[in-house]
Image: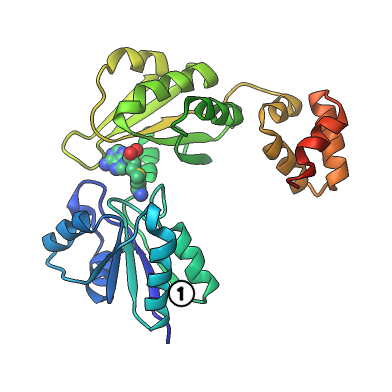
Amino acid sequence: MFGNLYLVATPIGNLDDITLRALKTLKEVDIIAAEDTRHTLKLLNHFEISKPLISYYKQTEKHKGEIILNKLIEGKNVALVSDAGTPVISDPGEEIVKLAIENNIKVIPIPGACACISSLIASGISASNFSFFGFLPVNNKDKINKLNEIKNYTTTLIFYEAPHKLINTLNAIQEILGDRKIVLCRELTKIHEEFIRGNISDILETIANPRGEFVIIVEGCTEKISDNNYLNTLSLDSHYEYYSNKGLSKKDIIKQIAKDRNVPKNEIYKYFFNSK
Ligand code: SAM
């Protein structure tokens, strides 16, 4: 019989946030696959758990994925953990989950801490509809393109960001999305936990040298925009996807995109000819 792949959430700061089920799972599995084995070893030592560890991080996902899959096929139960929080969410794991599913291995989530959800629920910004983007691209041009693509989303927007890139990212958000209401959620579950609420411009004036870990919660677009304006802010691929989801044929999608953007049909055709 095949083993199970457990996706085990670990604390994002406060070790008391480990769940009973996470501890039970980590104690019972045969192997723990960890993003950084030294980091996970500290957590396991704290809870007096001793298990064989295998490293599994972004650059080794393919090779280590095969090793883990073989262990699962041999009948070993494997727990996947990341350095902090929920595996797969802006952390390694997506590849092994796909591989496991393709090979009829049972994938079992063991829920727990996740920085984006903890931030959202305490932000005071609408949690009824939200979009999570993880880290924005590092390259400034790609960052701007991404922000342009999402600037008309009416859902609450959630981003992760490293402290040394925070100011640059807040400036980019302000430039493209406007001076929106945001919440900076800092050092969640730790001693210096803090929620900094306000408009981007006000917040930029108060944070000179950001330290610690941050989640950025941004209010969704509140301006009324027409469908056409909205579609024209999307990338061509997203524009295509919009009509494709409505069931239009390739020919009609190209015709419609050209009409929306007021450009010749063959320009759009050329763009999609090789890729779609
Ligand atoms: N998988 C993790 C999760 O479930 O949230 C996220 C991992 S991602 C590599 C790390 C980013 O998550 C950080 O750069 C920060 O944006 C956010 N983060 C993680 N822990 C946090 C904390 N205690 N307080 C605020 N943000 C945190």
Q: Is residue 193 above or below residue 199?
A: below
Closer to the camera in the image, 26 or 2: 2
Badge 1 marks a residue whose secondary structure is: strand
Closer to the camera in the image, 251 or 196: 251
| Residue ID for mark 1 | 106
Residue at 81% x, 28% y is: 260
Can residue 118 be seen? no
Residue 233 in percent (x, y) is at: 67, 27
Q: Tell me which image quadrant ligand 1 sits in.
A: top left
Quadrant where the N terminus is found in the figure: bottom left
Residue 175 in percent (x, y) is at: 50, 16
| Label 1 near ligand 1 (CB < 8 Å) | no
| Marker count (numbered) | 1
Q: Is residue 23 above or below residue 12?
A: below
Characterize the local packing of mark 1: few (<14), some (14-19) or many (20 or more) Cα atoms within 10 angstroms: some
Q: Is residue 203 left or right of residue 267?
A: left
Can residue 38 be seen? yes
Residue 100 in percent (x, y) is at: 47, 70
Q: Is residue 34 left or right of residue 120?
A: left
Q: Is residue 34 left or right of residue 128?
A: left
Q: Which image quarter: residue 47?
A: bottom left
Q: Amino acid at mark 1?
A: Lys
Colour approach in the figure: rainbow
Q: Is residue 133 left or right of residue 161?
A: right
Closer to the camera in the image, 96 or 178: 96
Residue 11 in percent (x, y) is at: 25, 52
Residue at 39% x, 31% y is: 216
Q: Is residue 246 above or below residue 255?
A: below
Residue at 38% x, 41% y is: 121
Q: Which image quarter: residue 138?
A: top left
Q: Which image quarter: residue 21?
A: bottom left
